[in-house]
Amino acid sequence: MLSKVRNVLGYLFPQKQTDIEKKFIELNRKFWRKENLNKESTSNYILVEGQIICPASIIDKARIAKAIEEVTGYRSVVYLRGFYEKANSTSQIYRSFNINKFYMWWSGYLNPTIVLPALYATVHTMVTCKDGKQLIDLVYKNIEIGDLIYDTLIRYKPNTYTIRKINFSHFRLIFRAFLAFHNNEYMIKKFRPRYLVTSHNVYAEFGLLPRQIKKHRKSVIFLKDIYAYKCYGVDANIKEHFLKPSLAEFQRNLASANFIVNAKAYFFSRFEGSVDQIDVKNAFVGKKKYDFDELKEKYPNLSKGKKNVVVMSHAFSDAPHVGEGLLFSDYYDFLEQTLRYLNSCDSINCFVKPHPSSYMWNEKGGVEEMIERNRFGNIYITPSDFNTNSIADFADCIVTAKGTAGLEFSCLGIPAITAGRGYYSGFGITSEPNTKEEYFELLGKCHLLGKLDEQIINKAVVLLYMVSLSRRHSDILPAQHIMPNENYADVFESKFAEVVGNIEAGKEMKDSFYNEVKAHAIQNYV
């Protein structure tokens, strides 16, 4: 709580750039001196999310905005935390990109036309939504918002993996969500944005605005998170997972023998832990390979005569409603109901694998606590040093809400059952029940599922490779982004120092990614 108070107080006073920020600003200005705005179109705006202030995120969003400006002549406006510009040092970073217009987000908190409707909506929600399921289904002003608020509650309320009842402890975060909604409405009315540049479309803080803009205007959303990039065109479904590729491109790649060869090479590199991605490293690097006999030594009740089902846990707090659907309230609810069902199945050995990066969300021990509390005597948790590629040697079926493991093990011919619509749904790779009843019916037959055929394996391999290619990381950026478990204040100067070094080494600011954004802006001119 004290850290939050200090953070808020920091925005009340003028901020100064560090020496390394000043150096970046000095070097960066030379790339963006030319004003390229169409003077007849300056009433049209590109709205830029300025809430995430990591150096790489700022640079990527600013470059996307400038690429759109170059195509359209529209003006960029960045919305920043704080009451006035000088209280947010990030504004000077954006100014070095020749982006000079800002909306100070916290000014909305002083606007009664924003605060009063938000307060009323919060009280109404607290009265009418008695449990988590009702909150998930909440629609406000014809926009689905309940799933985003739900995910906000389990993300920012410590150790809240699932929500049974709505109570007063949820008031602050629900109120903040409605403040965001009405602040967004104010910005949309004020700037009438044709484009939005953002780093996320999850949680209320970030996910509401894309949905609101799509509801109000013919608009295009450019999303660039830590690595993934997606352009949501005018007619795109904004709830589509940001990693999901187009079906047409998928079919073209599936028809290419050369692409399949490259895709298989990527897959085997991934399973060796050679891919530079945090979840891959955590799952495959520095871990022990276990076979079934070693697991049986740890768990003597395992039977060699039964089929082996592995349930893959998710990071519970990590936006369970990202994508187009989840059969359960959240990842915790999915896991608990799934394990409860499988615990009573005598025809299988059931293992559960905790998510390798759950520590990043301060969730260590969540799966173990669930198993112990429910007394799941027939569920076997994998060892803490378990290498995920061990699963390939003994698993007959994978169960996941919508995690990457369902796609990864499909590449090896191991069938997967999913309980949600993630980025690989709809491609004919995994079993995708539409209801809980269908899901549990499939679980009851999971021991009867056979190996996948070569056609489905190729689909899985191609799609996994395509998702890897959706990653964008420009040479101008720091080698590693600031991750959720890192302290921003401890590392941000070193990240700017890397960028300064990259500029001085001649790395391109307007690189292939910049040109790709320009091409998408041309295709989606509004």
Image (cartoon, grey):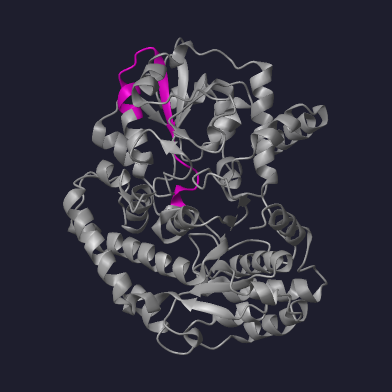
Q: Quadrant of the C terminus?
A: bottom right
Q: Is residue 116 left or right of residue 88?
A: left
Instruction: Measuring from the top left, give residue 190's x and y in whole percent.
Output: 47, 72
Residue shown at 56%/73% (left/top)?
77
Instruction: Measuring from the top left, give residue 24's x and y in whole percent.
Output: 69, 80
Q: Is residue 350 magenta?
A: yes
Q: Is residue 521 left or right of residue 170?
A: right
Is residue 477 something one can see in this rendering? no
Q: Nearer the viewer, residue 82 or 104?
A: 104
5 lies above or below 522: below
Q: Is residue 321 left or right of residue 79?
A: left
Residue shown at 35%/35% (left/top)?
328
Residue extending furthest toward the front: 40
Residue 44 occupies quadrant: bottom right
In magenta, the rendered stretch is 338-359
> How many marks do you count on the picture?
0
Instruction: Measuring from the top left, give residue 193's x and y in whole percent.
Output: 54, 65
Instruction: Measuring from the top left, give residue 38's x and y in whole percent.
Output: 70, 73
91 lies above or below 357: below
Residue 433 occupies quadrant: top left
213 lies above or below 506: above
Residue shown at 67%/79% (left/top)?
98
